[in-house]
Amino acid sequence: MLSERHSVVQARSFAELLEQAVRKYQNRAVETAQVIEELIALAKEMRDAGARGEALELSEDELAFYDALETNDSAVKVLGEPTLKAIARELVATVKKNVTIDWTIRENVRAQLRVVVKRILRKYGYPPDKQEKATQTVLEQAEVLSQEWAVAEGEVDVPQMHLAFGVENDSR
């Protein structure tokens, strides 16, 4: 199942839906039973999101980038699913090859990755008016995945990584 920490787009979407349900309940716009129904529907939606990767024949990493690209409706219409899948696969391979554990704090490496992402988007004909937003979302997704990859490959231990990214760690 695709974890919410894995996909920044899915995490935002599910967080918004959860906030809406809680807000409606707090404003007494819905009854408790209806909130429970909405939360059950949200849980089902989250489960179904994980199955999307299998249906699209994409890995979790590829699906996370696919989602980052798919937020632009015109890109989906213009390019179509096969092209977006190809872009997502190329982004995973390229980002994995180009990121280091400190890339998010080294501006020159970050700038280089930004150029590479834009080049890939242009190569596949991603709509120019939407490239900047897509590049931002892809870089945000790359930041999340690069942290996961570094931990999975044993390049860095979690407490050290939290220090590198300025995240406080309460596990003492």
Image (tube, grey):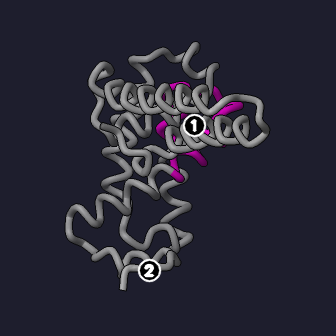
Neighbor class of circle 1 (other Cα within 10 Å; few <14, some 14-19, many 20+) is few
Residue at 50 percent across and 79 percent down: it is: 168
The picture places residue 61, in percent across and down from the top left corner, at 34, 42
Is 85 part of what is drawn in magenta? no
Element under disc 1? helix
Seen in the image, is 167 located left or right of residue 19?
Answer: left
The picture places residue 18, in percent across and down from the top left corner, at 59, 39
Residue matched to label 2: 170
The correct choice, above or below, for 105 with respect to 68 in the image is below
Q: Nearer the viewer, residue 167 or 57?
A: 167
Q: Main secondary structure of the magenta part?
A: helix
Mark 2 → mark 1, Cα distance in angstroms = 27 Å
Is 121 part of what is drawn in magenta? yes
The correct choice, above or below, for 45 with respect to 110 in the image is above
Range shown magenta: 119-140
Amino acid type at circle 2 is Asp
Amino acid type at circle 1 is Ser
The picture places residue 120, in percent across and down from the top left corner, at 47, 38
The correct choice, above or below, for 116 with respect to 72 in the image is below
Query: Which mark identifies residue 13?
Result: 1
Q: Nearer the viewer, residue 157 or 33?
A: 33
